[in-house]
Image: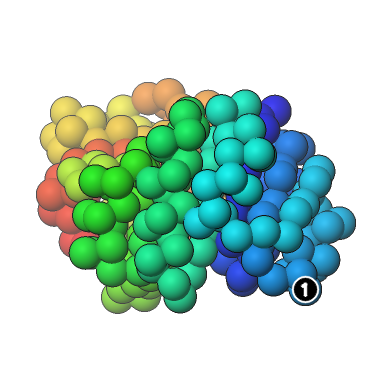
């Protein structure tokens, strides 16, 4: 369980608050609008109405005591940037800030953000990859070079074992799990045989994945 300071309770911030609550974390939620604060009260440990560009207000929250500070402010980049910078100046351990454009991400990283969540770009990338191919079901970008894909098992692999395919040696790709009817099997060995209506989670370099699965 972590203690998290969540600043900005628009749609994005509210979804974060709900998920953090499901995961059992302690959340202090902040927004300048009372109605937004009221809306997340059932999902957070504590909440306050306030302006986080005000150094005195932000300092009174004890930002050093939180494991993570998330700046989810949208629509007002100046406020997001000022809040991010103040958090770092006040000794925040980890600052994660929302960006909506490339230039915003650069400014945030230069002014206190340890990590940037580029929501629109990440969702756009996922949508483009997911729906431009019939055999891709999910996609998680790990870095600029590596990713995890959930892909349909190629027809020519059905009835063969992982050992017979030898995907790691041929393509430098690791099979992490197989999936059927929403049930995940993470017990992977060379003897596991592929069947119809099955997908698999594969990890590798983007170029290798694209070559192997025609992405």
35 left or right of 85?
right
3 left or right of 197?
right
Hey, which quadrant is residue 63 in on the image? top right
Position in image of residue 112 (x %, y %): 34, 42
Q: Quadrant of the N terminus?
A: top right
6 left or right of 157?
right
Give the class, few, some or many, for how many residues have Cα within 10 Å of label 1's Cα (few <14, many ≥20): few
Q: In this view of the protein, which residue sits in the foreground, 25 or 189?
A: 25
Q: In this view of the protein, which residue sits in the foreground, 113 or 138?
A: 113
Q: Quadrant of the C terminus?
A: bottom left
Q: In this view of the protein, which residue sits in the foreground, 98 or 180?
A: 98
Secondary-structure class at tag 1: helix
Q: Is residue 23 in view?
A: no
Hey, which quadrant is residue 137 in on the image? bottom left
| Residue sitting at x 77%, y 73% | 35
How many numbered badges does the structure rendering display?
A: 1
Residue position for label 1 = 35
| Residue sitting at x 31%, y 52% | 108
Q: Is residue 86 in view?
A: yes
| Residue sitting at x 76%, y 70% | 34
Identity of the residue furthest to the right in this view: 42
Position in image of residue 201 (x %, y %): 42, 44
Position in image of residue 154 (x %, y %): 32, 56
- Does residue 50 sit above or below 185 in this rendering? below
Query: What is the basis of the colouring in this image?
Result: rainbow
| Residue sitting at x 86%, y 56% | 42
Position in image of residue 169 (x %, y %): 16, 28
């Amino acid at each position: 369980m972590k203690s998290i300071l969540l600043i900005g309770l628009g749609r994005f911030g509210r979804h974060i608050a709900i998920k953090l609550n499901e995961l059992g974390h302690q959340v202090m939620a902040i927004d300048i609008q009372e109605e937004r604060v009221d809306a997340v009260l059932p999902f957070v440990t504590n909440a306050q109405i306030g302006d986080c560009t005000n150094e005195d207000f932000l300092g009174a929250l004890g930002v050093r005591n939180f494991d993570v500070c998330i700046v989810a402010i949208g629509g007002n980049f100046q406020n997001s940037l000022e809040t991010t910078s103040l958090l770092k100046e006040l000794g925040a351990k980890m600052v994660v800030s929302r960006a909506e454009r490339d230039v915003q991400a650069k400014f945030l990283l230069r002014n206190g953000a340890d990590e940037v969540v580029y929501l629109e770009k990440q969702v756009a990338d996922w949508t483009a990859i997911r729906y431009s191919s019939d055999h891709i079901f999910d996609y998680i970008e790990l870095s600029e070079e590596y990713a995890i894909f959930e892909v349909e098992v190629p027809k020519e692999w059905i009835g063969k074992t992982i050992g017979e395919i030898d995907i790691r040696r041929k393509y430098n790709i690791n099979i992490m799990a197989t999936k059927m009817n929403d049930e995940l099997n993470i017990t992977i060995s060379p003897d596991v045989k592929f069947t119809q209506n099955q997908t698999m989670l594969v990890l590798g370099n983007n170029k290798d994945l694209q070559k192997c699965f025609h992405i």
